């Protein structure tokens, strides 16, 4: 296998906050395997989701386009999502990688319609949302084949409608996370027998709710007191009313704390399985020629700003900012931190760049961050990044968030806009939208967003101009 064509392993979690990782300053959640990976990798400090909703963000990964351009703006089968299943076009990531002679594989959450084999991947089709992956036939066949039975106890509900958590009292081998890792090893084991390189994407359903984790992982957190988020208390003065769509009825920390513990426990379970997969790569001399990308589709709220739950309808750091850890072929001797802005659409360009695709074909709404990984002098890298929102489920709602330097501006169509100075106010408690001292900055941020919208063919531009200029 030529060294210029590495294997690429992309590990994606669902709804994971950056503060679950020590590389991003996390202090409570235990992720020793990701900590070890980060010690040999580039940690991107300012990476943002194209959209804090599953389907739009995942379609951006496969197309390199923002949701307003790939047109899957909402979760599948909901208003605003043009396609029930991701169209199998020639410029999808899977098809472009096959042009570069890659074997392409996929297991785990898809949430882009029927399944990844419809667009050229080898692997598993898990159609729909999946709700943690517990209901799929393949998982139950795995349990039966291994003589296993999953047992959930101590189920808790009530902090937010439809969300629940539970303890897995059966062996760790009964978890969906263990099953998915087994599937990943199974397919990679086939791919490594071939002469061509492989791209494999392992997609965990967690730590998205339901927050389910085995006893041994819950025991890491069961008897400790977890401090409330720094922005848990927020009277939401001068904040958009739309935020209330996702606000829990209960706003005391003791109501949220058990769910946070289950959330952290599920992250620790996922971390353990990532360690198992990395051990497999090392045993079979694959690790040094495999680029490993670890990230999430978007973040999670879990009670921030006065009891906000889930994601979307608000553009806070906890839901829009995502982890991105990249181990190149030649691992680093210590963590390299990268502060420039990166977005979901850049992943598509970067993966194709590593695969050897012509650079003219790799840049769509993003561009390759490979030069940043290799510490090249990139003078024209964008000094801003955008996250878009289009609503969720039956509520369509237009939002655009732009980060530039320490400032964040959010256009809330039909509601109060937001402006945060993250240097002075990292927890986004004070909306400076009406502060006279920030009016020049606000004007600049609006102009920068309008320029970005024009450049990226965002049809919301005319509405934005009519309402804010």
Image: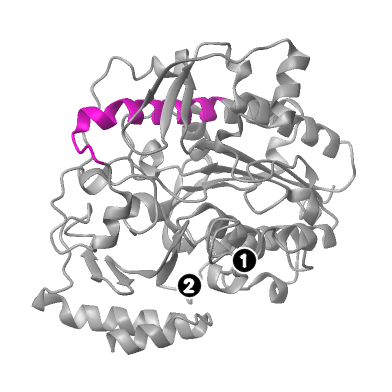
Q: Is residue 357 above or below residue 324?
A: below
In this rendered view, identify the residue nearer to me: 415 or 12: 415
Residue at point 63%, 72% (across, down):
363
* Chief secondary structure of the magenta portion: helix
User: Residue 141 at what x, y percent from top left?
Assistant: 76, 23
Real-space Cα separation, disc 2 to disc 1, in angstroms = 17 Å
Which element is circle 2 on?
A: loop
Q: Which residue is mark 2?
A: 381
Tell me what residue is drawn at x 61 percent, y 48 percent. Answer: 328
Q: Which residues make up the magenta segment?
A: 249-272
Along the viewing direction, whichever of 24 and 87 lies nearer the viewer: 87
**Residue 444, horizontal then vertical, whole percent:** 28, 82
Please name the residue that numbered disc 1 is placed on: 64
Tell me the SS state at disc 1.
loop
Q: Residues within 10 Å of mark 1 (few under 14, many from 20)?
A: many
- In this view, the residue in front, 449 or 424, is 449
């Amino acid at each position: 296998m030529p060294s210029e064509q590495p294997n690429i392993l992309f590990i994606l979690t669902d709804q994971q906050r950056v503060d679950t990782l020590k590389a991003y300053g996390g202090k409570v959640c235990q992720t020793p395997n990701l900590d070890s990976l980060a010690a040999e990798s580039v940690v991107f400090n300012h990476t943002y989701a194209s959209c804090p909703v599953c389907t739009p963000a995942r379609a951006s990964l496969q197309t390199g386009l923002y949701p307003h351009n790939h047109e899957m703006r909402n979760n599948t089968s909901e208003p605003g999502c043009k396609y029930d299943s991701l169209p199998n076009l020639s410029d999808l990531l899977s098809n472009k990688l096959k042009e570069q002679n890659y074997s392409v594989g996929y297991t785990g959450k898809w949430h882009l319609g029927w399944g990844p084999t419809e667009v050229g991947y080898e692997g598993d089709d898990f159609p729909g949302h999946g709700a943690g992956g517990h209901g799929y036939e393949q998982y139950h066949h795995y349990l039966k084949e291994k003589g296993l039975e999953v047992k959930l106890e101590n189920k808790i509900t009530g902090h937010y409608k439809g969300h629940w958590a539970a303890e897995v009292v059966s062996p760790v081998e009964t978890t969906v996370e263990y099953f998915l890792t087994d599937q990943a090893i199974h397919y990679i084991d086939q791919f490594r027998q071939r002469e061509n390189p492989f791209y494999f994407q392992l997609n965990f359903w967690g730590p998205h709710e339901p927050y389910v984790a085995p006893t041994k992982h819950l025991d890491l957190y069961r008897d400790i007191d977890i401090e409330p988020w720094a922005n848990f208390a927020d009277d939401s003065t001068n904040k958009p009313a739309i935020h209330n769509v996702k606000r829990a009825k209960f706003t005391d920390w003791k109501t949220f704390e058990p769910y946070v513990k289950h959330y952290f426990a599920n992250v620790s379970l996922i971390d353990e399985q990532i360690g198992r997969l990395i051990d497999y790569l090392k045993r079979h001399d694959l690790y040094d020629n495999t680029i490993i990308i670890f990230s999430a589709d978007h973040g999670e709220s879990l009670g921030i700003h006065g009891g906000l739950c889930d994601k979307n309808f608000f553009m806070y750091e906890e839901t829009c900012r995502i982890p991105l850890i990249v181990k190149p072929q030649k691992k680093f001797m210590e963590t390299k931190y990268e502060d420039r802005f990166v977005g979901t659409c850049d992943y598509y360009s970067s993966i194709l760049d590593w695969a050897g695709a012509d650079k003219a074909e790799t840049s769509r709404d993003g561009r390759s961050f490979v030069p940043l990984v290799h510490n090249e002098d990139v003078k024209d890298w964008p000094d801003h990044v955008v996250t878009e929102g289009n609503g969720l489920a039956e509520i369509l709602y237009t939002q655009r968030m732009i980060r530039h330097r320490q400032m964040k501006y959010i256009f809330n169509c039909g509601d109060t806009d937001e402006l945060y100075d993250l240097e002075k106010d990292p927890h986004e408690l004070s909306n400076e939208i009406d502060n006279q001292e920030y009016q020049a900055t606000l004007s600049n941020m609006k102009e920068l967003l309008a320029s970005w919208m024009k450049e990226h063919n965002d049809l919301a531009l005319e509405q934005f101009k009519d309402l804010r200029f």
